[in-house]
């Protein structure tokens, strides 16, 4: 499978059809994170509630982002205490990729951040114009996992010229 997705299709496919079904792990990478709401059983909830549910089901969640989340995201985050100990998080100011990897089997890459106007459920009048793809092609999924993992494991830190902005140096 290799599907090109646009606008709301990103939310419907990446979030509602794939991310919520993670069984082993979910890796999320974004440059920007804001409050992101999704449909759960007919009601709109923070995506963080979905992540909380996944953690309760023993799904390992990694969250890699470039800049501090907005205040509404922080308020939602505080509603789910399991996130603080159950979701691995890392901030890297160089992260600009937008990637979602589900169980090492399916991957999304594209322009949409983890925001309501990007991968969220915003109405057409309020959402960004986004493009991305989803695939289960093993080579592509592996390549996206390798890029994510290299950043996660700090393999890019030695040559990074923005280390003074890293959370570890503050």
Image (tube, helix red, strand yellow):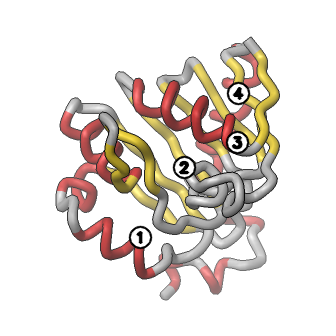
Estimate how packed mark 2 is, as few (under 14), some (14 to 19) or many (20 or more) residues with alpha carbons within 10 Å: many
Q: Are marks 3 and 2 in contact (CB under 8 Å)?
A: no
Q: What numbered label is drawn on residue 73?
A: 1
Q: Are marks 4 and 3 in contact (CB under 8 Å)?
A: no
User: Disc 4 or disc 2, which is closer to the eye?
Assistant: 2
Give the distance between the C-alpha atoms of the residues marked 4 and 3, in whole angstroms: 16 Å
Q: Nearer the viewer, residue 30 or 39?
A: 39
Element type at mark 2: loop
Mark sitting earlier along the chain (1/4): 1
Mark sitting earlier along the chain (4/3): 4
Give the distance between the C-alpha atoms of the residues marked 4 and 2, in whole angstroms: 18 Å
Position of 15 with respect to 24 (left or right) is right
Element type at mark 1: helix
Give the distance between the C-alpha atoms of the residues marked 3 and 2, in whole angstroms: 28 Å
Give the distance between the C-alpha atoms of the residues marked 1 and 3, in whole angstroms: 26 Å
Residue 158 vs 50, above or below: the answer is below
Mark sitting earlier along the chain (3/2): 2
Residue 74 vs 43, above or below: the answer is below
Q: Nearer the viewer, residue 118 or 98?
A: 118
Element type at mark 3: helix
Question: Could you tell me residue 33's position as x and y percent?
Answer: 55, 65
Mark sitting earlier along the chain (4/2): 2
Residue 144 vs 34, above or below: the answer is above
Question: Could you tell me residue 144's position as x and y percent?
Answer: 70, 34
In the picture of the structure, the residue carrying the numbered disc 3 is 147
In the picture of the structure, the residue carrying the numbered disc 4 is 134
Question: Could you tell me residue 80's position as x and y percent?
Answer: 21, 59
Q: Are marks 1 and 4 in contact (CB under 8 Å)?
A: no
In the picture of the structure, the residue carrying the numbered disc 2 is 121
User: Disc 3 or disc 2, which is closer to the eye?
Assistant: 2
């Amino acid at each position: 499978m290799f599907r090109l997705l646009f606008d709301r299709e990103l939310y419907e496919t990446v979030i509602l059809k794939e991310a919520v079904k993670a069984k082993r792990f979910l890796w999320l990478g974004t440059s920007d994170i804001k409050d992101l709401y999704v449909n759960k059983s007919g009601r709109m909830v923070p995506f963080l509630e979905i992540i909380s549910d996944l953690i309760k089901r023993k799904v390992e969640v990694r969250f890699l982002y470039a800049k501090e989340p907005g205040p509404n995201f922080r308020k939602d985050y505080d509603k789910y205490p399991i996130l603080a100990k159950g979701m691995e998080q890392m901030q890297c100011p160089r992260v600009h990729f937008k990637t979602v990897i589900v169980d090492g089997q399916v991957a999304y890459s594209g322009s949409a951040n983890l925001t309501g106007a990007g991968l969220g459920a915003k109405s057409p009048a309020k959402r960004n114009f986004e493009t991305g793809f989803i695939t289960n092609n093993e080579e592509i999924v592996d390549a996206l996992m390798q890029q994510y993992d290299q950043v996660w494991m700090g393999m890019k830190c030695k040559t990074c010229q923005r280390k003074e902005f890293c959370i570890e140096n503050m």
